Image (spheres, rainbow, N blue to C red):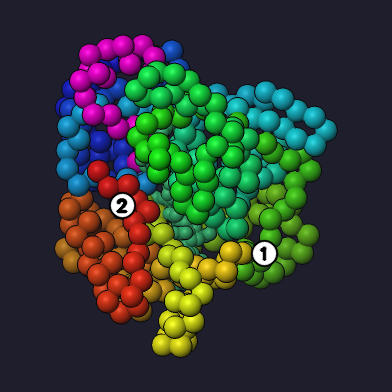
Amino acid sequence: MKLFHNYSLKQLNTFQIESIASYFVEIKSMDELLELMREEVFKNNRILILGGGSNILFTKNFDGLVIHPTIRGIEIINEDSTWVYLKIGAGEIWEKLVEYAVKYNWGGIENLAYIPGRVGAAPIQNIGAYGVEIKSVLQSLTAVNLKSGKQKVFTKDECGFGYRTSIFKTRFRDDYFITDITLKLERTPTLKLGYVALDDYLKANNILKPKIKDIFDAVVNIRKTKLPDPEKVGNAGSFFKNPLISKDEFVHLKKKFPQIRSYPQNDGSFKLAAAWLIESCGWKGKRQDDVGVHHTQSLVLVNHGEASGTQLLSLANNIQNTVKEKFGVLLEKEVNII
Ligand code: FAD
Ligand code: EPU
């Protein structure tokens, strides 16, 4: 375990923002984490766990200790004729895990293809795309309490999953270090269709009886046309969540803005397409200096080169204000601001 001092995080966040961590360390195993927790540098500093940095915006240097999990391993811990139970280390790359599952025809995460980041972060905001969230396949996860050092296994129900949230973003924010997760995957995949963009893609490509690999390829291809590649243009995916509003609020808004894009929810509320709200305020494709709103997806803020974290945050706040003014709706940030 090597401790670095004044470590640049520029290559470790997909916005590609420069930020210097006072201390930086990689953790390869649970034992290394427990060993680190006995060190003064751990006890005397603020802690930030940094996975792939694809859901983080640095607005300043980090005056503390950054821990980067590189815990590896994909292991079958149980199986029967229907299910495969996979235990995966927090440091594995999510995209590689999806490729691996698809290769073996284990169903459940193919709709979550091509989402950047590490496995340990996936439950934090209950990653979701194309009609699936990780909560539908997560069996349990192991986490270490950063104050007591105690390990705890959280079952799916204990994780408090919701749309882009979990107990690790709310009640236990910054309290736990996730070291591994266990997924329950299907040997004979039940494909999750029904998401309009996915179904349209399959139809347009004449794929009438899709297999798991067809879903994987479709999701990857759709994503490539919509979202900027962080290797080329710094971004963190959707900057805001899609807002949830009550039926009454929705009826009122729909009268005023008949074109509004919305999705009715099972509990009677409505989810609005934040991208549409932002585009309707004239932000799509806008750029000032190196800070901008992506030209094909207005929910994605971009760093065209040398943008700073504060410039991006200021753009995000301006967007929030104009959306609030025009629609009376508050956009909540999805990205973690440091
Ligand atoms: P980081 O950004 O490093 O960290 C995110 C948060 O998790 C931080 O608060 C961090 O402290 C915490 N954390 C990280 N690892 C651990 C751990 N082991 N234990 C405890 N806390 C931890 N998200 C979606 O849900 N759906 C999408 O479709 C999607 N598309 C994206 C597309 C692009 C182009 C990009 C750049 C991002 C996208 N995202 C999407 C967001 C992002 O990929 C996910 O949130 C991902 O899970 C973040 O993983 P990470 O390792 O990069 O986390
Ligand atoms: N739209 C616009 N303007 C735009 C872009 C989209 O009006 O600039 C409209 C589209 O026409 C569509 C609606 O907005 O009617 C939704 O767009 P899209 O299908 O692209 O999905 P999204 O709601 O913008 C969400 C997630 C993504 C996820 C996709 C696919 C959130 C905050 N974002 O985006 O997740 O990949 O659905 O399921 O829920 C992320 O979290 O980082 C992320 C990329």
Looking at the rendered structure, the kind of residue marked 2 is Gly
Q: What is the distance, in whole Å, between disc 2 and disc 1 at their CAs?
A: 31 Å
294 in the magenta segment: no
Mark 2: secondary structure:
strand
Q: Which residues are magenta?
A: 33-53
Relative image position of residue 231 (x, y in whole percent)? 36, 48
Relative image position of residue 242 (x, y in whole percent)? 44, 63
Looking at the rendered structure, the kind of residue marked 1 is Gly
- Is residue 328 something that shows in the picture? yes
Quarter of the rendering occupied by the N terminus:
top left
Give the side of residue 148 with respect to residue 72, left or right: left
Relative image position of residue 65 (x, y in whole percent)? 24, 26
- Which label was assigned to residue 176? none
The mark total stands at 2
73 relative to 59, above or below: above
Give the side of residue 48 with respect to residue 92, left or right: left
Give the side of residue 138 with respect to residue 165, left or right: right
Residue under pointer 1: 194
- Is residue 279 something that shows in the picture? no
Residue 30 quadrant: top left
35 in the magenta segment: yes
Q: Residue furthest front?
A: 248
Residue appearing at x 39%, y 14% in the figure: 34
Q: Which label sits in the foreground, 2 or 1?
A: 1
Answer few, some or many: residues within 10 Å of disc 1's Cα (few below 14, many 20 plus, some between 14 and 19).
few
Residue under pointer 2: 234
Give the side of residue 136 with respect to residue 186, left or right: left
